[in-house]
Amino acid sequence: MNTIILIVFCLGYLLIALEAKVKINKAAIALFTGGFIWSTYILFKTDTEEIVQQLVEHIGSISQIIFFLIGAMTIVELIDSYNGFDVITRLIKTNKKRMLLFILAFITFFLSAVLDNLTTTIVMVTLIQKLLHDKNERLLFVGMIVIAANSGGAWTPIGDVTTTMLWIGGQITTLNIVQKLFFPSLISMLIPLILISFMVKGDFKRVAISNQESLVLGFEKRLVFYIGIGALIFVPIFKSITHLPPFMGILIGLSVLWIVTEILNKGKAFEHKITVTNALQKIDTPSILFFLGILIAVAALEATGMLSSLATMLSESVGNLKTIAISLGILSAIIDNVPLVAATMGMYDLQTFPTDHYFWEFIAYCAGTGGSILIIGSAAGVAAMGIEKIDFFWYVKKISLVALIGYLAGALLLILLL
């Protein structure tokens, strides 16, 4: 049984990694892999009730992540529909390439911590396309945006899906992860930023952002932007006060924004209304289903005991927890960091490594920033690759080394701070 499950899991991973080649959406592969593994597991066991109970318990944990993602993505999509991100774009005044690079990197770093690295990358890559029309000139900026987005997402519980998973799972707490990971994450962004800044020089011809007539009033744009951002910032505060799961906080925030937009739409013609219903139709549902499928698949590996066996093997062969975490971070550049973190959570329990143990802090940092080493190593990188049609080997040649240097420098600082 274990052999069949392991083969199917590895094949599923291979097909997910080769999504661009096989032309099959990774969400479909992930859902099939998860369903097949659980089906195989239950068919080889006699106590089916126990296995069903295991599945129900895992679904309870997984659903918290899924509901959180749906709420957060809807809020961000609604802000974008109201052109709320113009609030950020209008702050950029420079026509110096190097200064623009620094401004974009720092905006991306902090915005990613509040939103998430995927959404922030999409917003910032779209912005740089409006500012720089020469693709060869733009690609270095996009590479830096990917690094900054992943670094920024690592030090808050809502900035990256993997950190959110650890937060929801009880492995980390909000204040501690911010305190411990801010400076390592900043270093992992700052060193590549300095190195890449030597590759850009001179001025650029600033292209005016389109001023085409908009149906969204200025005050509506600002109102939705600030309420939406406030709703996202509210989530960790809500959890610390009520101790309820984060998805409850994000759903409350979404409901407030929903009520506000309904009031704003009163009296408008149907075709001029921008509603939560529209936003729900635009969110990246395949990505949500991918997370669902891969988390279900990893849950099956945990239920069978295969992950605990792997943890024992790693502990015996490698031993050093920091080395294990750093290796997993580098591995996340090849394999998606979501299943890696999910597997790690299944391999090491909270009894052995309690909440806010340095091992979980290391995992949060490494899984969040290690994906920058390759363009396919993070959701942010994949999004940028799709928008800009970035060549894999161009990224390896121009960005991978500086990303690796930044990653290792941040890891070293984290070790010194422990």
Image: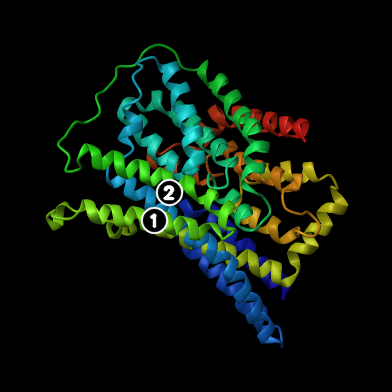
Residue 53 location (% of width, % of height)? 64, 80
CA gap between label 1 and label 2 equals 7 Å
Q: Decide: few, some or many residues near mark 1? Use Cα within 10 Å; few <14, some 14-19, many ≥20.
A: many
Relative to 254, 395 lies left or right: right
The quarter in which the C terminus is drawn is top right
Give amino acid for label 2.
Ala
The answer to whether the residues at label 1 and label 2 have Cβ atoms under 8 Å apart is: yes
Q: Residue at x 66, y 86 (%)?
A: 49
Can the viewer see residue 321?
Answer: yes
Confirm whether residue 382 shows in the render.
Answer: no
**Dot 1 amino acid type:** Leu
Which numbered circle lies on residue 316? none
Residue positioned 66% across, 56% down in the render = 170
- Residue lying at the far bottom in this picture: please name it: 46
Q: What element carries label 2?
A: helix
For the point 63% across and 81% down, the residue is 52
In this picture, residue 198 sits left or right of residue 335 = left
Q: Which of marks 1 and 2 is nearer the N terminus?
A: 2
**Residue 254's disc number:** 1
The number of numbered badges drawn on the structure is 2
Q: How is the image coloured?
A: rainbow
Residue situated in front as seen by the camera: 64 or 241: 241
On screen, residue 216 above or below 32: above
**As rendered, which of 245 and 12 lies closer to the eye?**
245
> In x, y percent, where is residue 317?
86, 51
* Image coordinates for residue 374, horizontal then vertical, percent: 57, 39
Residue indicated by mark 2: 231
Give the quadrant of residue 120: top left
Q: In which quarter of the image is residue 218?
A: top left
Taking the image as shown, residue 50 lies to the left or right of residue 133, namely right
Return the x and y of residue 92 as percentages of the image width and height: 35, 23
